[in-house]
Amino acid sequence: MTTLLERIEIESAPNPTAAIIWMHGLGASGDDFAAIVPELDLTGCPAIRFVFPHAPVMPVTINGGYIMPAWYDIFGTELGAGAVRHEDAAGIVKSQQHIEDLIANEVSRGIHPSKIVLAGFSQGCAVALHTGLRHKAKLAGIMALSGYLPLASTVATERSAANADTPIFMAHGTQDPVVVVGRGEDSRNALASLGYTVQWHTYPMPHSVHPKEIADISAFLQEVLR
């Protein structure tokens, strides 16, 4: 029997017919983005179940081996622009399976995959992109906030044709000291070179969320879930 990640669930209205699975960043929790739900303008959207999973806890190399919530280990070479990258492939794939299980859980509750959005911030963004591009059924969209495309060299061979045309919303702060904007641009360019449709947005902010970004997320959700 599959054990699902612990999570917070918020429904915008009874009997949801759409879902957004939203992954937090390194060291945070599902609570991190739950507070944003009341700020979103969901005019015209169906009833939505927001799912905010808590990442497993593990030692994180970049933080001196400190044990914290993380979707995978970070060695320190992944976050710069144009760098040679050493990435925790096994950890990323393990988190991919956790998110696949959450998608399957929503489908079992009557929500069609084409009404599911994968979203994530920072490390959660990486997991959302990795999983969404490989998912075997068509999804409504992918929201990639202040993060990057992990294991970029494997996308071409592992991606699913079902999500070749799935809209991707990417947002990044121009003053981000954690995941530099150039890393986000590298990811956008890699996706574009593979033919993906990417909405690219930048905001004058560090590693955070901007009020204008909330409005742009609202517009994206209205577009893909109407």
Image (cartoon, rainbow, N blue to C red):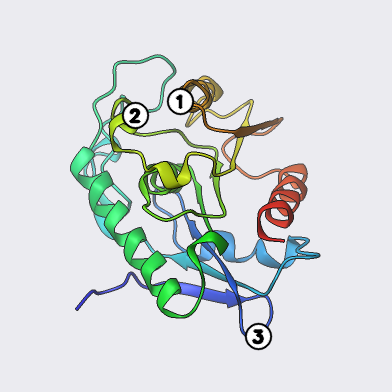
* Residue at image location 74% in from the left, 45% down from the top: 216
Q: Earlier in the sequence, mark 3 or mark 2?
A: 3
| Three-letter amino acid code of the residue under disc 3 | Pro
- Image quadrant for the N terminus? bottom left
Q: Is disc 1 placed on a helix, strand or loop?
A: loop
> Do the residues bearing badges 1 and 2 touch, measured as CB atoms within 8 Å?
yes
Q: Answer few, some or many: residues within 10 Å of disc 1's Cα (few below 14, many 20 plus, some between 14 and 19).
A: few
| Three-letter amino acid code of the residue under disc 1 | Leu
Q: Which residue is mark 3?
A: 14
> Do the residues bearing badges 3 and 2 touch, measured as CB atoms within 8 Å?
no
Residue 146 occupies quadrant: top right
Query: Which x, y percent locates residue 37?
Result: 67, 65
| Three-letter amino acid code of the residue under disc 2 | Ala
**Vertically, is 35 above or below 142?**
below
Q: Which residue is mark 1?
A: 194
> Looking at the image, which residue sits at the far bottom?
14
Q: Earlier in the sequence, mark 1 or mark 3?
A: 3
Q: Earlier in the sequence, mark 1 or mark 2?
A: 2
Q: Is residue 187 left or right of residue 4?
A: right
Query: Which x, y percent locates residue 52?
Result: 48, 65
* Residue at image location 49% in from the left, 79% down from the top: 110
Which is nearer the eye, 160 or 219? 160
**Vertically, is 216 above or below 32?**
above
The alpha-carbon separation of the residues under discs 1 and 2 comes to: 7 Å
- Image quadrant for the C terminus? bottom right
Visible residue check, residue 77: yes
Which is nearer the eye, 19 or 5? 19
The alpha-carbon separation of the residues under discs 3 and 2 comes to: 39 Å
